[in-house]
Amino acid sequence: MINVKIYFFASIRENFGKKILDFQVQNGSTISQLISTLEREFNLTSIHNCMVAIDMKYVDKNYIIKKYEEIYLIPPVSGGNEENLEFDDQIIIDENVILKDQIIESFFSHEDGAVVFFYGVTRNNHDNKTVISLEYESLIPMAKNEINKIFVSIHRKWNVSKIVLLHRLGKLYPGEISMLIGISSKHRKPAIQSIDYLIDELKKTVPIWKKEIYDVGEEWIEDNITSY
């Protein structure tokens, strides 16, 4: 038998009632078999369509467990590590308040003729329900890895000079900024096109989840980036 440590997030964590589970699997078991076992033993039907990460990288469900692993079960998100050291990019994911002018001054230079900013702002409504507050949660190291991969892709597709992304975690109230993105380029089209691309790509693989708290009830919005 092999010992593994399993981490749960967002709606899966709430349904299970635990964030971490120490578990044993047969040597040579696949991730798919592990998920089936967890579904059967703990009635965790919510993990059937989850993604799985090991060492902060997504793995296929045919991945074979041969040694001790720390396994992250990732609910659907709002899909290695590529270094991006040649550009002056920045990723900040934390619980600090995001200010409207927080990154503006750093973007102006003599070389670039276009700067585009995007603000994700907390709304007070969703599907005809009154939103009291939001709660954001993330697997931060992996989120940064996945965002960096998107940054690398943007630099390959467009001639942009700088990308900065801030995402706030924890509890937010209507009117507060949840995400701020800035992109600069020599001309306007690369900056405009790449910021739209970045927002679309974030929802595919970046492990950031949002829970909406209503005047009556609450709900995990696990494809949360689509709300921007």
Image: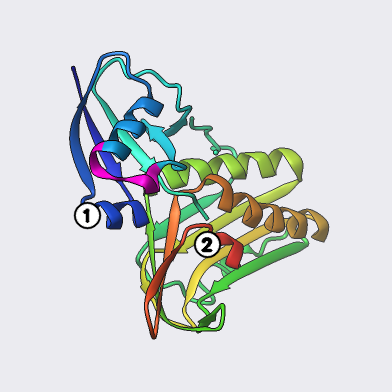
Residue 95 % position (x, y): 35, 65
Q: Which contiguous range is marked in magenta? A: 41-47
Q: Is residue 136 left or right of residue 203?
A: left
The residue at the point 49 percent across, 74 percent down is 177
Alpha-carbon span between mark 2 and mark 1: 22 Å
Q: Label 2's element?
A: helix
Name the kind of residue labelled 1 in the image. Gly
Q: Which residue is mark 1?
A: 17
Residue in view at x 37 percent, y 21 percent: 30
**Of label 2 and label 1, which has the lower sequence position?**
1
Residue 143 magenta-highlighted: no
User: Depth check: 224 or 147 in front?
Assistant: 224
Q: How far across and how far down the image is residue 1, in percent?
A: 18, 17
Q: Which is the main secondary structure of the residues drawn in magenta?
A: helix
Quadrant where the C terminus sits is bottom right
Q: Single out the mark in the foreground, 2 or 1.
A: 1
